[in-house]
Amino acid sequence: MTECGISQALSAMKEFARGKTVRADAHGKPSRREARRDAIMAAATQIFVEKGYGATSLNDVVRLSGGSLSTLYDMFGNKAGLFRAIVTQRCEMMTATFENPDIYSRPIGEALSDLGIRFMSVLTADDTITVMRSVSSEALQFPELAQVFYEAGPLRGRARVAGYLEEQARRGILTLDDAEEAAMDFCQLIIRDAQMNAMMGLPYPKTPEAIERHVSRAVGCFLRAYGTAVQTQPALSPPSLPPLAATGR
């Protein structure tokens, strides 16, 4: 992938990461309920980032987003449900590659590179890192926080990756003993210590060139371990991305 291509990919993903997408109804107009839901999630993300999970109140979220507390409860149930929705949205941002109808016909190296860039972009975004720090520091005080995060984030994401890898194995592109184990290997190869370093304020891949090198090595490593003779070589060509995002610093 060229610097221009990866820069455009990362830039295109920013607006989604910040919760500024609004889904439309059948007539192409924004649904009022979905617009309200997105506004609440954007406000909650901002407050979670600023105050942390424990210090965030739903009244604060309502004041920032508008609407009513009853609407928030109707949509999300409680604060843990609101946090789950935010983490789920981030997971969907990372795995949106699988929404493309041609995902299984694309060269596997290209598809995995697209996926890897999304992973790196979302998981090292400034607001994601801040929320991760909050989860780490508050998990013992709020046990539901860690559970919600794990189920809506890592567990959900790996399941989607595993489904894709299992289908590629069925097509003879990969050789797998366990799709879930392979998905975990892929995720670990992509993330490695990047997110931890970001949380600790240490160096990690930030620039388009660094992200390209990082993802290219990870995908190549994965395909050498799991690829078959008929798999295509990993190629980092510019992916066709819907509006989704990362830091791109």
Image (cartoon, rainbow, N blue to C red):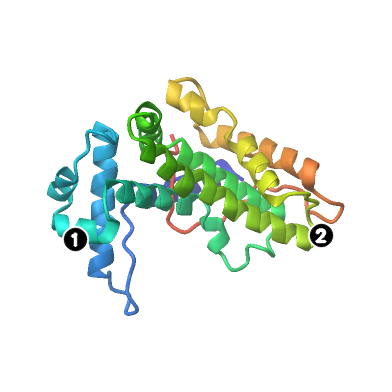
Q: Which amino acid does label 1 sit on?
A: Thr
**Residue 126 falls in image quadrant:** top left
Q: Residue at x 23, y 47 (%)?
A: 43
Residue 70 in the image, given as x and y percentages of width and height: 16, 59
The residue singled out by tag 1 in the image is: 71
State which mark lies toward you, 1 or 2: 1
**Quadrant assignment for the N terminus:** top right
Residue 33 in the image, given as x and y percentages of width and height: 24, 67
Q: What residue type is labelled 2?
A: Gly
- Give the class, few, some or many, for how many residues have Cα within 10 Å of label 2's Cα (few <14, many ≥20): some
Callout 1–callout 2 Cβ contact below 8 Å: no
Instruction: Name the residue nearer the viewer: 142 or 155.
Output: 142
Q: In this view, does 142 lie to the left or right of 202?
A: left
Structural distance between the alpha carbons of marks 1 and 2 = 49 Å
The numbered mark, 1 or 2, whose residue comes first in the sequence reads 1
> Residue furthest toward the bottom?
27
Q: Which residue is drawn at 27% across and 69% down?
A: 30
Q: What element carries label 2?
A: loop
Q: How many marks?
A: 2
Instruction: Name the residue nearer the viewer: 214 or 88.
Output: 88
Instruction: Name the residue nearer the viewer: 187 or 194.
Output: 187
Q: What element carries label 1?
A: helix
Residue 232 in the image, given as x and y percentages of width and height: 78, 53
Residue 88 in the image, given as x and y percentages of width and height: 42, 51
Q: In this view, does 152 lie to the left or right of 76?
A: right
Q: Which residue is drawn at 28% across and 51% down?
A: 41
Inspect this view and state whether residue 205 appears.
no
**Quadrant assignment for the C terminus:** top left
The residue singled out by tag 2 in the image is: 172
